[in-house]
Amino acid sequence: MRSSVSSAPLQIAISALQHFAYCPRQFALIHLEQAWSDNHLTAQGNVLHERVDSHEVETRGQKRSERAVQVYSDRLGLQGKLDLLEVFSENGKPRRYVPVEYKRGKRKVMDWDRIQLCAQALCLEEMRGVSISEGALWYWQERLREVVALNDQLRDQTLACIDNARLVLQSQVTPPPTTDLTRCKNCSLVDLCVPQIVRRDRSGTYVQALFEVEKISAEDDQD
């Protein structure tokens, strides 16, 4: 498994990695331009996480469940919150750690959610000096728990995502829209992103027109 390239890493929220993996432009709009807009999907997700963010610790037999666990990695420059950490013990000593992330919708074919989960596991490994072989994603809409193997392939994908997301933050440049139109359909930022217009107008005249409108508005305010 390769290591991240950053020597003095700029801090990235772990949840932002899911945004980047899904669409680098969405990531930049949220984390560079501070743009956000809720739709019914994000609202449902907020309600779900309000339910699980109780900070309660529960022990049943050999399993301890820790909720809303703060995690970070100085080495990778990550920080965030884990919905649930399951700690399995043997003879009173912790032996196995399983991070669990709650998601509102259905299982994904792509690894967007798995990358977020893997990043959480990387933080836990650094914080607690342990090795974590698997995690889990709980999909509320399907009432289904997906076990995720944290293998070298997923770890490499996650490290690449971290590095590429950090490059976007350092460059301060918002990437162009994704070519996968199906991702735009459920994106709460589609009206701010205007992917169809930006795709058609690669020359930059659309952006220039926005500046012209702002300039005219400013002149009108001064009159």
Image (cartoon, rainbow, N blue to C red):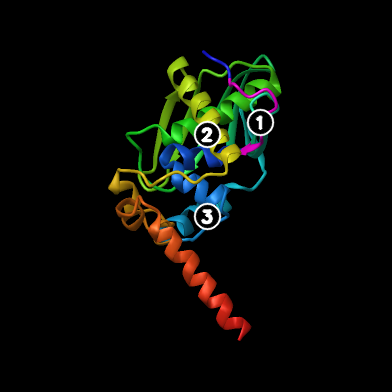
Q: Amino acid at mark 1?
A: Gly
Q: Is residue 213 left or right of residue 68?
A: left
The residue wearing badge 3 is 46
Task: Say if mark 3 contacts mark 1, CB within 8 Å.
Answer: no
**Residue most toward the bottom?**
223
Above/below status of 85 relative to 152: below
Above/below status of 103 relative to 157: below
The residue wearing badge 2 is 100
**Comes first in the chain, label 3 or label 1:** 3
Residue at 48% in and 59% down: 43
Q: Residues within 10 Å of mark 3 (few under 14, many from 20)?
A: few
Residue in the foreground of this view, choosing between 133 and 41: 41
Total numbered badges shown on the rendered structure: 3
Q: Is residue 79 left or right of residue 105?
A: right
Expressed as whole percent of the image width and height from the top left, the position of residue 204 reads 40, 54
Secondary element at tag 3:
helix
**Residue 10 lies in the magenta stretch:** yes
Residue at 46% in and 17% down: 151
Nearest to the eye among marks 3 and 1: give it.
Answer: 1
**Comes first in the chain, label 3 or label 2:** 3
Above/below status of 193 relative to 134: below
Secondary element at tag 2:
strand
Rendered-image quadrant of the C terminus: bottom right
In terms of image quadrants, where is residue 128? top right
Secondary element at tag 1:
loop
**Residue 114 lies in the magenta stretch:** no
The residue wearing badge 1 is 77
Q: Residues within 10 Å of mark 2 (few under 14, many from 20)?
A: many
Q: Spatial distance from mark 3 to mark 2, Cα to Cα?
A: 17 Å
Expressed as whole percent of the image width and height from the top left, the position of residue 80 reads 63, 39
Tell me which segment is drawn in magenta.
4-12
**Comes first in the chain, label 1 or label 2:** 1
